[in-house]
Image (spheres, rainbow, N blue to C red):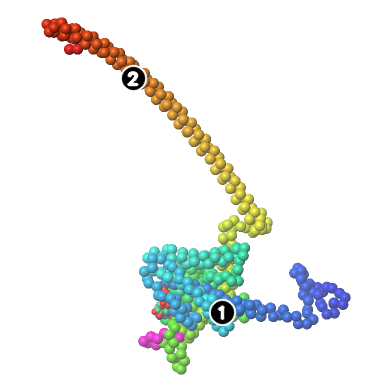
């Protein structure tokens, strides 16, 4: 409903219209102003900045990941084939600058190495999940910086994950289901049946149905081409029904009729990569590159990255609302967290202080005890020393007495000897007797 407002001279040239509830008025313009060039301005700016697109190829060794990438971008990217002897799954990432017309594209191709080659495949999905999270984390860290340069930042978040399914014709392997389930909330998964020339037409139809039903029954969310934009709704709707695409890769050009075509030649015939009757390669290229590249980029940012960011910030304790569901600003959360942290810090400090005082008291008591023991030991030793000293003095005194007595006896003996030498030898016997009495013999 439109309500007219304003009056006077303006009323003739301007019709002021206010939409209820919107709080803004629509006014017709009297002439050309120029803001209809805004979309062109955006296009020019984006073209001059260039775009980036990151593809993750997940699939067993030798399933044709590198060949498909070369075929998709009509070039030869470097990359050595992996061996089947890898101890674990790794990711190999290469970035290339591509140019088509005047549009620059920074393309990153990440490929799994050694996927499906281990006997125990329980943890095979982990390095892939970790890699995707690491790219989200790097973007989040850039976003949280005070001086962020997001326009110059090389965004390495994965926009599309091509999941290569082996052309067994049976069903999905449990490794495929587990890996896709772990990835589906983090990345746009586009499942593709690799080397689909190895599977017959009737088998392929059944295989596609089987894969789709298995994905649905296991709750694996794969990327759906968007149907909300009228211009692409029809084609995207049709293509959603063709998923998973059955693809063939080849960079070999063969002359078919009078045209050079990408094909694979076999003893029994030739399979043409870009022939829609032979495989879904063209459908994949259309959907991935020509029609939905921007949607894949946008979904990565608005859905997968947003989820990662939300979980990460919640993990850090940030919330939009308080327990009473009232809005809670980042500033308030930060203040609350800071106060909580300071409180904890003070508590810890007090605890440490108490512990320190207790330890000092204990040490003091220990030292006092040791001092007391030392004093007692000193007293004991002192007493022992005094006793020893007294004993020695007593002994010395008795020895001195003995020496004196000896000296007296010696003097008496010498006197006696001199007297007897005067009295003559007859007296010898008597002398000896006297000597004996004196203790010399
Ligand atoms: N039949 C058939 N063979 C293919 C197809 N695509 C690739 N190949 C062949 O499969 C072999 C392995 O191809 P790659 O592209 O190196 O496979 P990959 O998955 O990159 O291998 P790793 O990087 O070693 O894991 C090569 O001999 C390719 O020629 C295909 O669509 N059909
Ligand atoms: Mg390869």
* Residue 412 visible here: yes
Q: Nearer the viewer, residue 219 or 335?
A: 335
Question: Label 1 to label 2, Cα distance in Å?
Answer: 109 Å
Under circle 2, the secondary element is: helix
Q: Quadrant of residue 330?
A: bottom right
Q: In x, y percent, where is residue 101?
A: 57, 84
Q: Quadrant of residue 425?
A: top left
Q: Earlier in the sequence, mark 1 or mark 2?
A: 1
Q: In x, y percent, where is residue 405?
A: 27, 11
Q: Residue at x 54, y 69 (%)?
A: 157
Q: Quadrant of residue 196?
A: bottom left
Q: In x, y percent, where is residue 329?
A: 66, 58
- Which range is magenta? 262-269
Q: Nearer the viewer, residue 383 or 194?
A: 383
Q: Nearer the viewer, residue 5 or 313?
A: 313
Disc 2 designates what residue?
Answer: 392
Q: Residue at x 47, y 70 (%)?
A: 214
Q: Is residue 409 above or below residue 171?
A: above
Answer whether residue 197 is magenta in the image.
no
Q: Residue at x 68, y 56 (%)?
A: 326
Q: Is residue 127 above or below residue 292?
A: above
Q: Residue at x 56, y 66 (%)?
A: 139
Q: Is residue 6 above or below residue 384?
A: below
Q: In x, y percent, where is residue 212?
A: 49, 73
Disc 1 designates what residue?
Answer: 104
Assess disc 2: are there few (<14), some (14-19) or many (≥20) residues with their C-alpha within 10 Å of its C-alpha.
Answer: few
Question: Horizontal placement of 303 versus 432: left or right?
Answer: right
Q: Residue furthest right?
A: 8
């Amino acid at each position: 409903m439109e309500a007219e407002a304003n009056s006077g001279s303006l009323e003739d040239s301007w019709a002021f219209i206010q939409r209820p509830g919107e709080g803004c008025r629509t006014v017709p313009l009297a002439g050309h102003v120029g803001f209809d060039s805004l979309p062109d301005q955006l296009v020019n700016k984006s073209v001059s900045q260039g775009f980036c697109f990151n593809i993750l190829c997940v699939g067993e060794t030798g399933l044709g990941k590198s060949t498909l990438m070369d075929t998709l971008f009509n070039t030869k990217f470097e990359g050595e084939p992996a061996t089947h002897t890898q101890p674990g799954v790794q990711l190999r990432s290469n970035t290339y600058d591509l140019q088509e017309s005047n549009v620059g594209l920074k393309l990153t191709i990440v490929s799994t190495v050694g996927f499906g080659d281990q006997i125990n495949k329980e943890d095979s999905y982990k390095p892939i999940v970790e890699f995707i999270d690491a790219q989200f984390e790097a973007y989040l860290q850039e976003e949280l910086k005070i001086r962020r340069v997001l326009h110059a930042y090389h965004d390495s978040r994965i926009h599309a994950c091509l999941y290569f399914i082996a052309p067994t014709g049976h069903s999905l392997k449990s490794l495929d289901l587990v890996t896709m389930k772990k990835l589906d909330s983090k990345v746009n998964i586009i499942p593709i049946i690799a080397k689909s020339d190895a599977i017959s037409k009737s088998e392929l139809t059944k295989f596609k149905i089987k894969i789709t039903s298995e994905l649905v029954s296991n709750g694996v969310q794969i990327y759906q081409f968007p149907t909300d934009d009228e211009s692409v709704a029809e084609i995207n709707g049709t293509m959603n029904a063709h998923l998973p695409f059955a693809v063939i890769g080849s960079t070999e050009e063969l002359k078919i009729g009078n045209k050079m075509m990408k094909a694979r030649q076999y003893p029994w015939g030739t399979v043409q990569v870009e022939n829609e009757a032979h495989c879904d390669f063209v459908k994949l290229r259309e959907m991935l590159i020509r029609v939905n590249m921007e949607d894949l980029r946008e979904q990565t940012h608005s859905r997968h990255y947003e989820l990662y960011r939300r979980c990460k910030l919640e993990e850090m304790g940030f919330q939009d609302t308080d327990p009473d569901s009232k809005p809670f600003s980042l500033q308030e959360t930060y203040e609350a967290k800071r106060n909580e942290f300071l409180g904890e810090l003070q508590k810890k400090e007090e605890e440490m202080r108490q512990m320190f005082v207790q330890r000092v008291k204990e040490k003091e008591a220990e030292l006092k005890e040791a001092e007391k023991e030392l004093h007692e030991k000193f007293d004991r030793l002192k007493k022992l020393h005094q006793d020893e000293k007294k004993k020695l003095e007593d002994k010395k005194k008795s020895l001195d007495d003995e020496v004196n007595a000896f000296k007296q006896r010696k003097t008496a003996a010498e006197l006696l000897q001199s007297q007897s030498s005067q009295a003559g030898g007859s007296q010898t016997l008597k002398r000896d007797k006297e000597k004996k009495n004196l203790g010399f013999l």
